[in-house]
């Protein structure tokens, strides 16, 4: 059992870049834009930041081995606490838990978490596999394991085990597009149908092109601080961090014991236990949607439904704004914004939603929100529970 | 636009364990490791037994039978080497020793495949002189009798 200082740290500012295509813009420029934006949102100055977390090691993020140091240098910050933990798209959610521990331990008081990438038009393209060729990847890469294929393998297995359908998966993409309709910054806003998803190219069966997230150039940042300082700030309603968990599953798909069970089954359990609440109490969730299957698996792993029940849960309209668990209210990665690692952007939408200022579909006074991010090849998951 | 250049996958640098494993493929042997202490098989090759971290591993050639755990027909990749091979059927296969491997299913119509299809290892040369282990669908009866005899 873990002890977590629930409610002792708050997110007091958040900013998502409106960029989606930024040819010729270095990702570090976007870091500067979003850190300035998040601090202005919080009513804080750069000199008040004494903790910083980021990772920029993906090719399209252009940082190298000391990526956090590079970004800190570029921004001219001088933090006394630094975190560059890297769990793929889950990293920036992990940073929240680590920052809460640091702030409550007294190592620092105000932490900025920043993310930026030129996923679409960046100077470097991703190699489409996640493990280095010297090491574990040696036994997988020769067979051509693409990023989409990892999720496709999980989807195929879920279909086999539970009778889940391609139509049920497509419903997730359709709902995210519907949520994006009113988001002026969303990359795609035109309504799509289940048939549109199923008739888009099967990039890696059973996943189609429209089962996959958008690929954008963008970024986002948010600011965490102690409850004491949060109560002194008046710019935004503080959003308190109530629970947290992180877990690693595997990197190679052949090491995943059950391809239908995400590491979110462990990180989610820790998050709910540390917050002292149950899945039924969550008003809204931002579930990492690199692919439609990522969302479906997260619903089950986090305990919103039993194993094998997510397909019916989705088809019955439960993830719509009017359903039992509205998700991805800004359009998510499937329609709004996904530069390569969406975790930070999912946090930002959770914060906006709890503050009543979602650019997509604003719900009526939500109080408890869950953000769950799945990184790598279903490799890692970080989950945070936020509340106002 | 600078491209991120992956090395030819099969020519990646190999440590001694990897070299041993790849050399065995030349003899049409797919090696897995077994902990003499726990009797558990593991794949991919590692320095110590997974879980116990004991230094008690021995090499065992896989019998060659397996079952498809999952599969996908890959029609697109951002990686030019993978893209050149599309479409191909990537698969997770549970070998009868109890380890799961990543491979491709070859010589099979994708429409005929399902999770649970019985397969057997085959060895195919690559242009760079390596040998890669793939699987082809097989009849269940013979494979099962072999497995029962050995385990």
Image: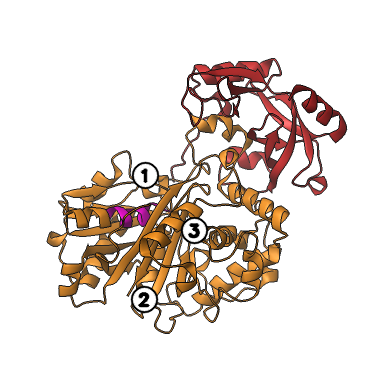
Q: Secondary structure at mark 1?
A: loop
Q: Is residue B70 above or below residue B50?
A: below
Inter-mark Cα distance, 3 to 2: 26 Å
Which residue is located at x 52 percent, y 58 percent? A290
Q: Reading the chain from its start, which is encountered first: label 3 or label 2?
A: 3
Residue A328: give x, y in percent of width and height. Answer: 48, 70
Residue wearing tag 1: A57
Give the residue number, with chain letter if any, for mark 2. A354
The residue at the point 81 percent across, 39 percent down is B108
Q: Is A332 placed left or right of A242 in the picture?
A: right
- Marks 2/1 same chain: yes
Closer to us: mark 2 or mark 1? 2
Asked whether, in this view, residue A130 is left or right of residue B86, the answer is left
| Lateral position of residue A84 relative to residue A245, left or right | left
Point 27% across, 60% down: residue: A5
Q: Position of residue A69 (x, y in %)?
A: 24, 44
Q: Chain of mark 2?
A: A
- Where does the magenta region start and end? A90-99
């Amino acid at each position: 059992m873990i002890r977590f200082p629930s409610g002792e740290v708050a997110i007091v500012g958040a900013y998502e870049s409106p960029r989606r295509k930024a040819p010729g813009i270095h990702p570090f420029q976007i870091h500067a834009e979003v850190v300035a934006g998040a601090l202005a949102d919080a009513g804080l100055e750069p000199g008040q930041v004494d903790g910083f977390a980021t990772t920029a090691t993906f090719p399209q993020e252009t940082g190298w081995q000391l990526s956090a140091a590079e970004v800190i240098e570029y921004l001219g910050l001088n933090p006394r606490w630094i975190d560059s933990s890297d769990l793929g798209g889950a990293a920036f959610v992990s940073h929240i838990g680590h920052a809460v521990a640091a702030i409550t331990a007294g190592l620092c008081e105000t932490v900025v978490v920043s993310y930026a990438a030129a996923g679409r038009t960046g100077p470097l393209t991703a190699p489409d596999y996640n493990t280095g060729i010297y090491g574990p990847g040696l036994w997988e890469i020769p067979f051509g394991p693409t990023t989409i294929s990892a999720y496709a393998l999980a989807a195929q297995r879920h279909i086999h085990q539970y009778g889940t359908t391609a139509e049920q998966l497509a419903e997730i993409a359709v709902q995210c597009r519907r949520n994006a309709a009113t988001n002026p910054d969303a990359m795609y806003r035109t309504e799509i149908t289940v048939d549109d998803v199923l008739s888009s190219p099967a990039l890696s069966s059973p996943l189609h092109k429209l089962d996959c997230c958008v690929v954008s150039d963008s970024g986002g940042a948010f600011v965490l601080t102690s409850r004491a300082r949060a109560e002194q700030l008046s710019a935004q309603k503080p959003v308190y961090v109530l629970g947290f968990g992180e877990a690693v599953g595997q990197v190679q798909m052949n090491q995943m014991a059950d391809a239908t069970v995400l590491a979110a089954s462990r990180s989610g359990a820790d998050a709910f236990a540390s917050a002292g609440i149950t899945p039924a109490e969550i008003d809204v969730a931002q579930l990492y949607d690199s692919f439609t299957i990522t969302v479906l698996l997260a619903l089950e792993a986090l305990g919103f439904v039993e194993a094998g029940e997510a397909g019916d849960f989705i088809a019955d309209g439960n993830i719509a704004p009017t359903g039992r668990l509205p998700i991805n209210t800004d359009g998510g990665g499937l329609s709004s914004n996904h530069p390569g690692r969406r975790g930070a952007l999912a946090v930002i939408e959770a914060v906006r939603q709890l503050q009543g200022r979602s650019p997509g579909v604003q719900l009526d006074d939500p109080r408890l929100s869950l953000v769950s991010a799945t990184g790598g090849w279903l490799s890692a998951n970080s989950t945070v529970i936020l509340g106002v | 636009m600078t491209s991120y250049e992956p090395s030819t996958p099969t020519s990646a640098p190999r440590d001694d364990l990897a070299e041993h494993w790849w050399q065995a493929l030349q003899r049409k042997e797919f090696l897995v490791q077994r902990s003499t202490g726990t009797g558990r098989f593991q794949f991919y090759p590692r320095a110590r037994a997974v879980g116990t971290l004991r230094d008690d591993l021995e090499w065992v050639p896989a019998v060659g039978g397996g079952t498809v755990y999952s599969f996908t027909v890959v029609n697109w990749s951002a990686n030019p080497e993978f893209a050149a091979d599309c479409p191909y059927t990537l698969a997770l296969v549970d070998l009868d020793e109890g380890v799961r491997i990543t491979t491709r299913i070859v010589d099979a119509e994708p429409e005929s495949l399902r999770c649970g299809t019985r397969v057997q290892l085959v060895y195919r040369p690559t242009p760079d002189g390596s040998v890669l282990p793939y699987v082809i669908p097989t009849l269940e009866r013979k494979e099962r009798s072999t497995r029962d005899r050995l385990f």
